[in-house]
Amino acid sequence: MVRVTRQLAERIADLARLLLDDESIDTPLQQIAELAMVLIPGSAAAGVIAAADATWTHAAAGDVADLD
């Protein structure tokens, strides 16, 4: 179980602001994937996919294969 601390809540809020402010989705998605690695003990990899209509983008952290 993940313990929600003030620091964690602030990092998630920062990510939410990035998603709203950044014209590019790549940076926030990468940060979300990296945060998942920190939050999930023992995880070897994490990935995030954002999809809209017929397009999608992704980010990964850890020991993962390139999806492109």
Image (spheres, rainbow, N blue to C red):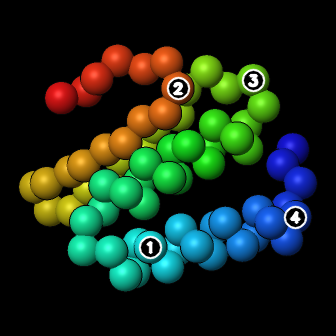
Q: Circle 2 sits on which residue? A: 62
**48 sits to left or right of 35:** left
Label 1 secondary element: helix
State the CA–CA distance, disc 1 to disc 3.
27 Å
- The residues tagged by marks 2 and 4 sit, at their Cα atoms, a distance apart of 24 Å
Q: Callout 2 environment at 10 Å: few (<14), some (14 to 19), or many (20+)?
A: few
Q: Which mark is residue 18?
A: 1
The residue type indicated by label 2 comes to: Gly
Q: Which of marks 1 and 4 is nearer the N terminus?
A: 4
Report the residue marked by disc 4. Answer: 5
- Residue 25 x %, y %: 30, 62
Instruction: Name which quarter of the figure residue 43 lies in.
Output: top right
Name which residue lies at 42% across and 60% down: 28
Q: In which quarter of the image is the C terminus?
A: top left
Numbered badge on residue 6 = none
Q: Which of marks 2 and 1 is nearer the N terminus?
A: 1
Q: What's the amino acid at mark 4?
A: Thr
- Looking at the rendered structure, the kind of residue marked 1 is Leu
Labels in figure, total: 4
In the rendered structure, the answer to whether residue 24 lies left or right of residue 18 reads left
Please provide percent x and percent y for residue 13. Answer: 62, 75
Q: Mark 3 points at which residue?
A: 42
In this view, 12 is above or below 58: below
